[in-house]
Image (tube, grey):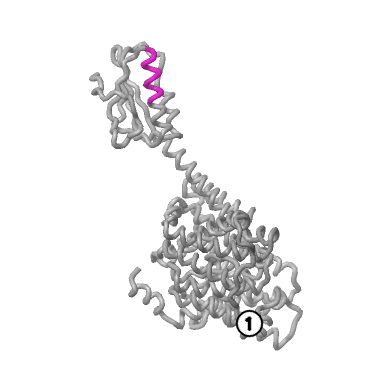
Amino acid sequence: MTFATYRAQWACNPLREVLAGMVGTFALIPEVIAFSYVAGITPATALYASFVLGVAIAVTGGRPGMISGAAGSVALVAAALVHRHGAQYMLAATLMAGALQVIFGLCRLQVLMRFVSREVRTGFVNALAILIFSAQIPQMTHVNWQGCALVALGLAIIYLLPRLGTAIPSPLICIVALTALTLWHPMPVRTVADLGALPDGLPTLALPHVPMTWETLGLVFPYALAMAAVGLLESLMTARVVDDTTDTHGDPRMESTGLGVSNILAGLFGGIAGCGMIGQTVGNLRYGGRGRLSTFTAGAFLLLLTTVLHRYVAQVPMAALVAIMIMVSISTFSWSSLRALLRHPRLSSLTMLVTVAVVVATHDLAAGVGVGVLLSGVFFAWRVMGLLHVEKHTSGRADLYIVRGQVFFASAELLYDAVDFHTTSKIVAIAVHDARFWDVTAVGMLEKIVAKLRDRGIDVQVEGLHREQHGLIDDLSDEPLLAM
């Protein structure tokens, strides 16, 4: 990335960027606080980490317009460590996870994202939308009629106000309007203050108080590796969604190293590791956030709200934030994928549905993506296996087998089954000009076929082998194919 490109990513439409980032901030607060309880840490710890992440990733990240925070699957991984060994070990794991992500970026391991198919990415996005929406259901079912009415009013403001003008994002107006209404006419509804105590000061540097021993390293490293892998996966998946939405290209390698640096800084300020947050990112994009300034604003405005203005933020009704999160979930869900279920190949649609099901059932995005990638690989192998064709021609006392297609671990048995080992012919020719042998299983199967035929006293000829392609093949004849 050139300096001119980097500078341009900061300079695009400042007012729009700042307002979009503010929308992302309000979408951050409830989810960050909710995941703080999941991870077993205080809301202040998660909010401080989100501030540091937002500001740092805006400077060091490779995907402008993407919002990161201390939530998501990383919190689920950290929860087990916190519950078993305490928050100080979580800080050590955060620092180590950040260092690992920097190493992942320097080693270009982000290329592994190429193995995540489109149907898996769609399932990831749809599952996230379902999880975001389902998290709002308790706020709508276990409340009085005033709370439900405020949610409905908030949604009306968010969706109807843009028809009159879009100078100010409607979610910001929703928050101001509903807060003013509840202050002017007090009613028994939940507010942000009910989620937990907000921080009232600036974060300070804090190193983890853990023994610097090999035992500590062995205890923390597995969690740190899981946090690094899950966080990077979620961030790169979110970055791909931004790429598709904006028709631009981010820098995955820079995003990986930037996330690692940001998590190290979050750990130094006593926070938990974080990653890209797709729901908040979609909200940011929806209201015009495309550059680094919107990401920076989301982090900086979060600190302003939770420290300087925390008294006012505490009075914001939860109904306003619920309305915003419902809008985010609706915007995140890929509604076109429902129509595509009948048009796309059944195996592709099944992969998407299984990815959604696993994520929703486990609340683990990494597990869903892992299962989806595995299914994509299995289904791809199944389709390629069907491309192998073996034709047999017999002339006199000679058999000719013409092999076309891809021979690998899944299709090697088909080649073996096509050969008649009880033939009465004295010569067997195997033509592989139009075939490609990809792995040890395929090569071993060809060698097995040749060996079994030769053991029966049959003269075997193999033609079309390219040793620069099939370097594993040994002890096979290079004689020309028998003319028939």
Location of residue 306 by image quarter? bottom right
Q: Which residue is mark 1?
A: 201
x 53%, y 47%: residue? 350
Residue 76 % position (x, y): 63, 59
Count how many numbered circles sit on residues in the image: 1
Q: Is residue 274 left or right of residue 317?
A: left
The residue sitting at the bottom extreme is 184
Residue 40 % position (x, y): 69, 65
Vertical order, 214 against 440 (above or below): below
Q: Which of these two is toward me, 397 or 194?
A: 194
Q: What type is the residue that disc 1 sits on? A: Gly
Residue 143 % position (x, y): 74, 71
Q: Judge whether residue 210 can be spotted in this image.
A: yes
* Residues shaded magenta: 447-456
Dominant secondary structure of the magenta stretch?
helix
Q: Which of these two is toward me, 149 or 276?
A: 276
